[in-house]
Image (cartoon, rainbow, N blue to C red):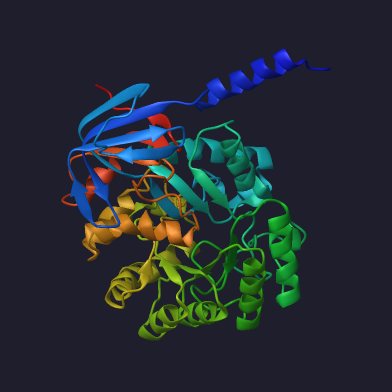
Amino acid sequence: MTWNLKQLSLIAALFTALSGVNAGAETIALKAGRYLDVARGRMIAPAVVVIKDDRILAINPAEMPKVDRVIDLDGLTLLPGLMDAHTHLTMELSEGWQHSAVTKTAGDFALLGSANAHKTLMAGFTTVRDLGAPYFADVAVAHAIDNGMTQGPYMIAAGHGTGITGGHCDATGYAPGVELTGYRTGIGDGPDDLIKAIRYQIKHGARVVKICATSGVMSHEQTVGAQQTSFEELKAAAEEAHRHNLKIAAHAVGEEGIIAAAKAGIDSIEHASLLTPAAAKAIKQSGAYVVHTLYLLEAVDPASLPPEFLKKGMLIAESSRESFKLALKENLKIVFGTDAGVYPHGLNAKEFSVRVRLGQQPLEAIRSATLYASELLNVPERGQITAGFLADIIAVDGDPLADISRLEDVKFVMKEGQIYKEPVR
């Protein structure tokens, strides 16, 4: 079938309408009670934020420009759109989840990821880094969001997590010959194999690299936190990611793996559940960020986990909390992450309350999901309500600096100048 220009224009308009993307240039003014300047750590009242197309044009201008629409958010607090640096949008712990690698198709995972992307956006998270999914389903979801085919956060996808044969990033627990893995699914042994695996992920759309430096909870192994990927392999992986101008994140639970990953040049240490002073020192010296995932320790339904997984999780639960306290004490560069997918999507903001309860200041917790996250995720035009930045803005009732749980009930969501959620008046 041959399409004429008029038909193509109508199809484009239909996709635009369905996706919720602005059909044309529009200037919007948000009027709210206050906004949080995360860089200066100040609430500024009142707040008038003018958005033109996808960017912030002005804040509290002396002379109001002509606008097409005024959004009344009276009494609400504006904040930059939140960022989650560790999600798994294509994953959920539904019945039979541990066998999903051999029971679900790429389409199943992508459709699930699309639904969870929408939940995450509605929860106020306008940017996520998705660290590992089968069949490049996360890349497919990211493309669908970018192209306006579905609604979700700006998504930085990893493709398959990379790691050694039989390691935490491998599909384990099956009989020989079932779900064979290799470089196409991120698995390799030795620097050359892992470089090939990383290149294959990048070839097919990965915008960040995930590598498993240690064993973990949710894989069929006897240890939790033991180093799996050698220093030489980690170093080669980091160099390859950086050669492509991409960041690399390492699942690293135990001391030896954390130290090896930090010294190898890995950009972020994920979980850091068994952090020690020596490991913290290595992280600080390397300049790496650390991304703890804490709410899941109380959110996961024990009945959803196989006994061996539950046993390992219980072993590291309290040490994970103490590790976060140590990271605070050592003034490490902490970025917000959740591991959402291990517990239901859309509850990401509950991570804030856990962190504050463990000693993080509310402002620092918010900065970890905005200002600091923008550095790690390499999205310098996001994470602040500042003229010239992309208009990723949320609104909540009350003052989250006084009550961080306010972030769990987001009333308004704008991403790149497009409104996805408004208060019910």
66 displayed left or right of 242: left
Residue furthest out toward the bottom = 278
| Residue at (78, 17) in percent of width and height | 3
Residue 226 in percent (x, y) is at 52, 78
Q: Is residue 355 left or right of residue 75?
A: right
Viewport quadrant of the N terminus: top right
Number of on-image labels: 0
Q: Is residue 423 above or below residue 215?
A: above
Does residue 180 appear left or right of residue 113 in this picture? right
Q: Position of residue 291 (x, y in %)?
A: 42, 64
Camera-nearest residue between 218 and 348: 348
Q: Look at 43% across and 39% down and name the residue there.
A: 55
Q: Nearer the viewer, residue 57 or 336?
A: 57
**218 is higher (above) or lower (below) than 262:** above
Residue 112 shows in the view: no
| Residue 235 in picture, x, y percent from top left | 62, 78
Q: Residue at x 63, y 46 (%)?
A: 139
List the single residue furthest toward the front. 63
Q: Is residue 308 visible?
A: yes
Give residue 237's quadrant in the image.
bottom right
* Quadrant of res 2: top right
Q: Nearer the viewer, residue 224 or 321?
A: 321
Percent position (x, y) of residue 307?
A: 47, 61
- Where is the C terminus found, in terms of image quarters? top left
Looking at the rendering, which quadrant does residue 173 occupy?
bottom right
